Amino acid sequence: MTRKILIADDEQQILDTVRAYLESAGFQTVTARNGREALFAFRHEQPDMIILDVMMPEMDGWEAARLIRKESDLPILFLTARVDDVDKITGLEIGADEYVTKPFSPRVLVAQVRAILRRVYGELSSEPTIWRVGDLELNDETRLVTVGGERVELTPSEFDLLAILIARPGRVFTRMELLERLQGDAFVGYERTIDVHVKNLRAKIEQNPREPRHVETVYGIGYRMRPDDD
């Protein structure tokens, strides 16, 4: 069963990064930019879990969580730039299941989401996510990649790059987007790093790296995973 996660944060970069990592891990996502939007999405989208930033405009995370707690006991994970013990205690008293301080590792955040869902929903949250495009298969839980049934050894960066692309076949990602999702930040001049990762990835998963069937170059923009029906 695919779980739906509501992510509420007024920083677009964090919102995009968390969404990308969760979707690559096989979750559905819904996003909000402030507490009022988060409350609306909670009531209409029926998420299985909420990732809630504390400091947001219009309605902060504290107030949104208090109102949500009057209607539901679904798991809530707070994101905050604050490190005060008082703030952590406040969050826990409201009913937070976890409290994550910025900056954070998106990979660790995904692991925390999995752990919370496993604790709350049991075996339903432990089903592995398996992505398949043609003869290419990626198991997000075991981090196993096979091509034509044969196992392929990838570096962590190569695996994460492939996971981002295969989770959304046909979607074109710019180099800067891919760099940001791999590293959590991106700087102009470093986006060519992605070209190196793609070159190394193709050498391992493509029958002919010079004529790739899976990871395609979209000239002047970036890369995409070629869908089965292309």
Image: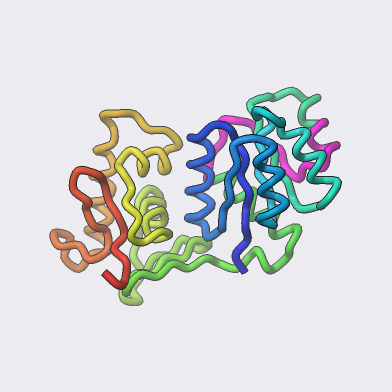
Residue 213 drawn above or below residue 222: below
Q: Nearer the viewer, residue 7 or 190?
A: 7
Give the quadrant of residue 46: bottom right
Residue 134 drawn above or below residue 112: below
The image shows residue 230 at horizontal and vertical percentages of: 26, 69
The image shows residue 152 at horizontal and vertical percentages of: 33, 65
Give the quadrant of residue 60: top right
Left or right for 168, reference 1: left
Q: Residue furthest left?
A: 210
Q: Residue at x 76, y 33 (%)?
A: 62
Q: Is residue 47 visible?
A: no
User: Magenta residues, as a range?
Assistant: 89-106
Q: Is residue 97 magenta?
A: yes
Q: Is residue 144 visible?
A: yes
Number of residue marks:
0
Q: Residue at x 28, y 36 (%)?
A: 191
Q: Residue at x 69, y 31 (%)?
A: 54
Residue 151 drawn above or below residue 162: below
Q: Residue at x 31, y 59 (%)?
A: 225
The image shows residue 212 at horizontal and vertical percentages of: 20, 62
The image shows residue 142 at horizontal and vertical percentages of: 50, 63
Left or right for 66, reference 111: right
